[in-house]
Image: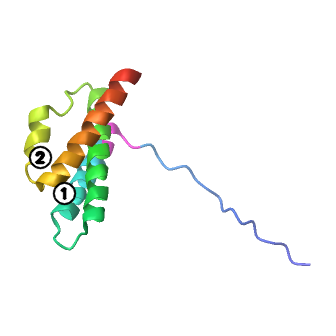
């Protein structure tokens, strides 16, 4: 009788990323989200999805920067970034940011 091969392969743990690497990844996600938001071929639903991704990513980026002892993104930085998006998506992003800030202030 043949032995069955195990279904789970040897899983090796991946190395931990540094905070700098994580921040670089967050900026790549932000750039990609901006690209999809500006893409004329994206549907409204896709743009809403990418607006949420952008908001969540910016929240994570703020926490990463704070953990490194840096100042989080200021409202002015956020405002200049949001000016590049259509108005209806700006409102969606701002609502998500306000919701995230309320949650993060009540937790921390």
Question: Which quarter of the image is occupied by the N terminus?
Answer: bottom right
Q: Is residue 87 visible?
A: yes
3 up-or-down from 19: above or below = below
At which x and y percent is residue 23? 28, 43
Residue pictured at 13% horizontal, 33% vertical: 75
Outermost residue to the bottom: 1
At which x and y percent is residue 92? 23, 48
Residue designated by label 1: 34
Q: Secondary structure at mark 1?
A: helix
| Mark 2 or 1, nearer chain start | 1
Front residue (pair 7, 14): 7
At which x and y percent is residue 74? 14, 31
Q: Residues within 10 Å of mark 1 (few under 14, many from 20)?
A: many
Q: Quadrant of residue 73?
A: top left
Question: Which quarter of the image is occupied by the C terminus?
Answer: top left
Q: Verify whether residue 62 appears in magenta.
A: no
Q: Which residues are magenta?
A: 17-22
Pointers 2 and 1 in contact (CB under 8 A)? yes
Residue pictured at 25% horizontal, 54% vertical: 28
Residue pictured at 12% horizontal, 56% vertical: 86
Front residue (pair 61, 70): 61
Q: Residues within 10 Å of mark 2 (few under 14, many from 20)?
A: few
Q: Verify whether residue 19 appears in magenta.
A: yes
Q: Is residue 3 left or right of residue 65?
A: right
Q: What secondary structure characterizes most of the magenta part? A: helix
The way the protein has been coloured in the rendering is: rainbow
Residue designated by label 2: 81
């Amino acid at each position: 009788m043949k032995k069955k091969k195990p279904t789970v392969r040897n899983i090796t743990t991946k190395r931990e990323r540094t905070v700098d690497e994580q921040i670089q990844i967050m900026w790549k996600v932000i750039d990609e989200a901006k690209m999809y938001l500006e893409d004329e071929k994206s549907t409204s639903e896709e743009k809403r999805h990418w607006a949420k991704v952008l908001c969540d990513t910016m929240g994570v980026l703020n926490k990463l920067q704070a953990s490194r002892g840096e100042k989080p993104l200021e409202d002015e930085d956020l405002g200049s970034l949001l000016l590049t998006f259509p108005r209806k998506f700006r409102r969606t992003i701002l609502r998500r940011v306000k919701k995230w800030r309320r949650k993060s202030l009540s937790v921390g």
